[in-house]
Amino acid sequence: MKNFEEKINIFLNTNYKNRITRNSAKTALNRILIIGEINIDKINKIYNLLNLSGSSKNTELAYIRKFINTMSKIENKFYDTSKLISFENDTKPKQIFNSLELSKIENALEKW
């Protein structure tokens, strides 16, 4: 487990220089740290049970997917990340525009 944790920390420090992004990725990778290995089926079970929005789950899974792909290259192993679960994007589009945004939209439509 310690070795797996070290791999995660090296990956985070190498790939995410921005503190906020690194913290988001760390949250996702800490969820799979309890597994102690790369196991697609167990990762899918964890994310099926999480009480997060679909968009948040997909974002976290993108960090995990990048980690798995990086480890695949380093360890010369194949992990089928296409089997990672994906969730419906449930973010709501913006419904209210301010006057400046409306005028830009109207101008763009007139030009079109």
Image (spheres, rainbow, N blue to C red):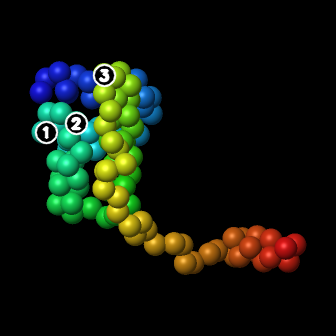
Location of mark 3 (residue): 75
Q: Residue at x 24, y 45 (%)?
A: 40
Binning the other alpha carbons within 10 Å of mark 1 as few (below 14), some (14 to 19) or many (20 upward) gives some
Contact, CB < 8 Å: mark 1 with mark 2?
yes
Residue at the spot of label 2: 38
In the rendered view, does 18 fall on the left or right side of 60? Answer: right
| Kind of residue indicated by mark 1 | Ile
Quarter occupied by the C terminus: bottom right
Instruction: Locate residue 26, reporting x and y percent.
Output: 29, 38
Q: Residue at x 46, y 72 (%)?
A: 92
Marks 1 and 2, how far apart at CA:
8 Å
Circle 2 sits in a helix, a strand or a loop, which is it? loop
Question: CA separation, marks 3 and 2?
Answer: 12 Å
The nearer-to-camera label among 1 and 2 is 2
Q: Secondary structure at mark 1?
A: loop
Q: Earlier in the sequence, mark 3 or mark 2?
A: 2
Residue 33, quarter of picture: top left
The span from disc 3 to disc 1 (Cα, nearest Å) is: 18 Å
Which element type, helix, strand or loop, lies under badge 3? helix
Q: Residue 59 at x, y = what percent?
A: 38, 51
Using a 10 Å C-alpha cutoff, classify the residue at mark 3 as few (fewer than 14 neighbours), some (14 to 19) or many (20 or more).
few
Quarter of the figure with residue 107:
bottom right
